[in-house]
């Protein structure tokens, strides 16, 4: 299958992801291996929040959303790690289906 583009950042960088949904059903972008606030989590589940904190949960067809993921030092590779750690990002609407259809990609967190 195909993967999404490689997202790569160094410690203290910030990922700013602009999602414009040209598809026919809702999607999101959910990261692993970086910090995110609730409004950039990209995960739809009953979490007891509302308002702005829910806008990132899914992007409807024709809609758009901007996710912000700071790469904090406490998420960085350690001295014993390689220069970059490999994580993933994926759509979190129907996770198994989304991943199986290629809505997943590598996310690299690298030392400065």
Image (tube, helix red, strand yellow):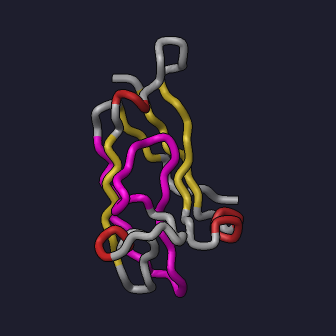
Who's the residue at 63% across and 72% down the image? 94
Q: Is residue 36 above or below residue 41?
A: above
| Pick the front one: 80 or 41 | 41
Q: Position of residue 76 (x, y in %)?
A: 42, 28
Who's the residue at 64% across and 59% down the image? 2
Quarter holding the C terminus? top left
Q: Does the segment drawn in magenta span residue 17?
A: yes
Quarter holding the N terminus? bottom right
User: In the image, is 21 to the left or to the right of 106?
Assistant: left
Q: Position of residue 81 (x, y in %)?
A: 54, 18
Q: Is residue 69 above or below residue 92?
A: above
Q: Is residue 88 above or below residue 73?
A: below
Q: Is residue 19 above or below residue 111?
A: below
User: In the image, is 61 to the left or to the right of 91?
Assistant: left
Tell me where the magenta segment starts and ends, as one range: 14-41
Q: Does the segment drawn in magenta span residue 93?
A: no
Task: Place residue 72 in its image quadrant.
Answer: top left
Task: Place residue 91 in its image quadrant.
Answer: bottom right
Task: Place residue 53 in its image quadrant.
Answer: bottom left
Q: Which residue is most to the front?
A: 48
| Pick the front one: 19 or 59 | 59
Q: Position of residue 79 (x, y in %)?
A: 47, 12
User: In the image, is 42 to the left or to the right of 102?
Assistant: left
Who's the residue at 43% across and 59% down the image? 41
């Amino acid at each position: 299958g195909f993967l999404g583009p490689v997202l790569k950042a160094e410690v203290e960088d910030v990922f700013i992801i602009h999602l414009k949904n040209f598809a026919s059903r809702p999607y999101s972008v959910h990261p692993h291996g970086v910090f995110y606030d609730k409004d950039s989590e990209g995960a739809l589940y009953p979490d007891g929040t509302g308002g702005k904190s829910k806008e990132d949960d899914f992007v409807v067809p024709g809609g758009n959303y901007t996710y912000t993921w700071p790469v904090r030092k406490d998420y960085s590779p350690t001295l014993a790690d390689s220069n970059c750690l490999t994580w993933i990002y994926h759509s979190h609407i129907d996770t198994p289906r989304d991943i199986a259809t290629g809505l997943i990609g590598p996310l690299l967190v690298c030392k400065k």
